[in-house]
Image (cartoon, rainbow, N blue to C red):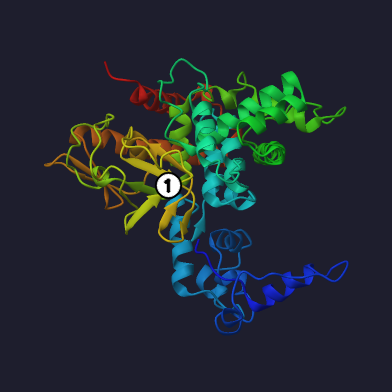
Amino acid sequence: MVEDWISRANARQRRGRAGRVKPGICFCLYTRYRFEKFMRPFQLPEMLRMPLVELCLQIKLLSLGPIMPFLQKALEPPTEEAITSAISLLYEVGAVEGDEELTPLGYHLAKLPVDVLIGKMMLYGGIFGCLSPILSISAFLSYKSPFVYPKDERHAVERAKLALMTDKVGGTNDPDNGNRQSDHLVMMIAYKKWDKILHENGANAAERFCKSHFLSSSVMYMIRDMRVQFGTLLADIGLIDLPKNYQIGGKWKEKLDSWFSDTSQTFNVYSDHSPLVKALLCAGLYPNVAATEQGISEKSLGTLRQSVGPTTDDSNVWFDGRRVVHVHPSSVNSNSKKFQYPFLVFLEKVETTKVFLRDTTITSPYSILLFGGSMNIQHQTGVVTIDGWLKMAAPAQTAVLFKELRLTLHAILKELIRNPQTGNIAENSVIQSIVHLLLEEDKPKT
């Protein structure tokens, strides 16, 4: 996303709002010269300024033929580069294969009204028994962050986030720092605490909680509605079950939201384990990944498990595979001097004075190995390369095992997505093994 000036047509339309009910005055935060010489007469068509991924998915769902020729018939067609980029992402996500054929995953993603990366994360959340936290994170990423930043209160907001992070999500498998170094987990914890206070102490207490933690109350209610919408869509696919007769009586939204939060349900058996939530964030948001110098060169990578090391000069410099990027100042990771792992995932890149990654989560090497892109194993040097630029050291035998595990996982997920009624995590030994592997990786080594 790049900041841009509005068009002259936009400016005139906004000016009209000042005189809607009586004569008014419009103050423009730009010069007359800029208005006349630099602003476009009209806004660019949406097809020329928005990602094309979801549009491409709809073309395949409706069987309208190859994507490129179809879009080139538009009155103002997108560039070939933009179309190629969207198609490439669909292949990377696993939504299409072969000659642009829709996969079972792509079929379900086309039916979810969210970004394809978020949709994939939601499907994985249901399959891996981690639905409730993933529903919350998906809703925040589809809407907006709940945090508000009053003038001159940025440090107070950061303290409020820190207070939320020090609260454990639950589960004895969480290490002390399990909730830190993740904006997505902070938002998820904020919703969980708000929802608990709302149910136990009422709306006024929930409002006080929002004020004391710089949260928008209206955003939290919107997130609750979106959780219900997303959960219902997953039920329509057949991935999860809804309670019987939930529409009888009032407050059906509250009933459904409580159902989606119920940790006794199969789809929530691992929802209290933050390492797994972060791994599923990686599964959904990949290839939106960045790495420090340590993550793109094999230096210092003695084992697959990275430990929290001492501060280094390059620990705050991140690369996205093409250029240097920066963690946005509003992120909990912006001021960190050392990180649990040298990799992070994000949804959105914003270009202003620099290229910023807005909401970020530090992710583990195992997550990258299991859910990342193409894997190249250099047997002699013991280096594993993901997508040609992310590097980590590992014995060749270990790397080959991960490659085989990944192939097995893909086959199982394909079947689970094709036949969602078989997606009972309690009965799937391979998925359970992967869950335990990810939880073990995050445990402090003694």
Percent x, y for residue 100? 48, 61
Q: How many marks?
A: 1
Which of these two is toward me, 131 or 218? 218
Question: Residue drawn at (51%, 30%), measured in percent from left and top?
Answer: 128
In the image, is 6 to the left or to the right of 386? right
- Write down the quadrant of residue 424 in the picture: top right
In the image, is 200 to the left or to the right of 151? right
Q: Quadrant location of the C terminus?
A: top left
- Write down the quadrant of residue 206 in the picture: top right
Which of these two is toward me, 33 or 343? 33
Vertical position of residue 122 compared to residue 321: above or below: above
Percent x, y for residue 325? 36, 54
Can the viewer see residue 166?
yes
Percent x, y for residue 400? 25, 37
The residue indicated by pointer 1 is: 286
Can the viewer see residue 98?
no
Mark 1, Cα crowd under 10 Å, few <14 / some 14-19 / many 20+, is many
Name the amino acid type tagged 1.
Tyr
Question: Residue drawn at (88%, 68%), measured in percent from left and top?
Answer: 22
Vertical position of residue 37 compared to residue 85: above or below: below
Instruction: Identify the element where label 1 is drawn.
Output: loop
Which of these two is toward me, 146 or 227? 146
